[in-house]
Amino acid sequence: MLFGTFDIVHPGHLHLFAQARKHSDYIIAVIARDKTVERVKGRQSKNNELSRLRKVKKYKIAELVVLGNLRDKYATIKKYRPDIIFLGYDQFVFVDDLITKLDELALKRTKIVRLKPHKPEIYKTSKMI
């Protein structure tokens, strides 16, 4: 399971999914909701959540692409019970209590894998918008 805004799908994102693919043959991409993006990043995304969801689906880089839950940030994890949660090199929001929450959800075997960046000086959405 991989979480992100994916405002503009760029080579950095494709590299992220390729790294995840080395660990799993079934990837669920969870697209951040518009309200979540605004709250976390302090700005609106360039593209709305449905547009971002469609774009990730179009690239066929995940077997399942879903929107995150507005009320419960862990609802998607509860529903799909992933074996692995992939984190981008720059993802730190909601991460602090992730291990504790996985224990509470009886997902102690779920691994957390931090993925490496791919040319972040070039391929970072905030630098491209």
Image: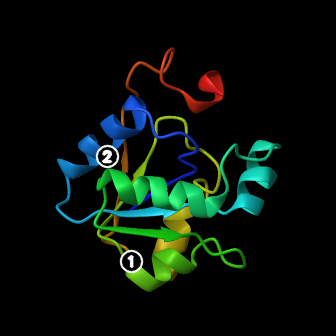
What amino acid type is highlighted by mark number 1? Leu
What amino acid type is highlighted by mark number 2? Phe
Assess disc 2: are there few (<14), some (14-19) or many (≥20) residues with their C-alpha within 10 Å of its C-alpha. Answer: some
Instruction: Quote the CA–CA distance across marks 1 and 2.
Output: 23 Å
- As drawn, 68 above or below 80: above
Q: Name the residue located 78 percent from the left edge and 47 percent from the top edge.
A: 44
**Residue linked to disc 2:** 17
Quick check: marks 1 and 2 in contact, CB under 8 Å? Answer: no
Residue 124 falls in which quadrant of the image? Answer: top right
- x and y percentages locating residue 66 in the rendered image: 48, 71
In this view, the mark in front (1 or 2): 2
Assess disc 1: are there few (<14), some (14-19) or many (≥20) residues with their C-alpha within 10 Å of its C-alpha. Answer: some
Q: Earlier in the sequence, mark 1 or mark 2?
A: 2
Q: Secondary structure at mark 2?
A: helix
- As drawn, 30 above or below 9: below
Q: Which corner quadrant holds the C terminus?
A: top right
Q: Name the residue located 81 percent from the left edge and 43 percent from the top edge.
A: 43
Determine if residue 106 is in view: no
**Residue linked to disc 1:** 107
- x and y percentages locating residue 15 in the rendered image: 31, 35
Determine if residue 39 is in view: yes
Q: Viewed as shown, does residue 89 lie left or right of 23?
A: right
Q: Name the residue located 54 percent from the left edge and 62 percent from the top edge.
A: 98
- x and y percentages locating residue 97 in the rendered image: 60, 61
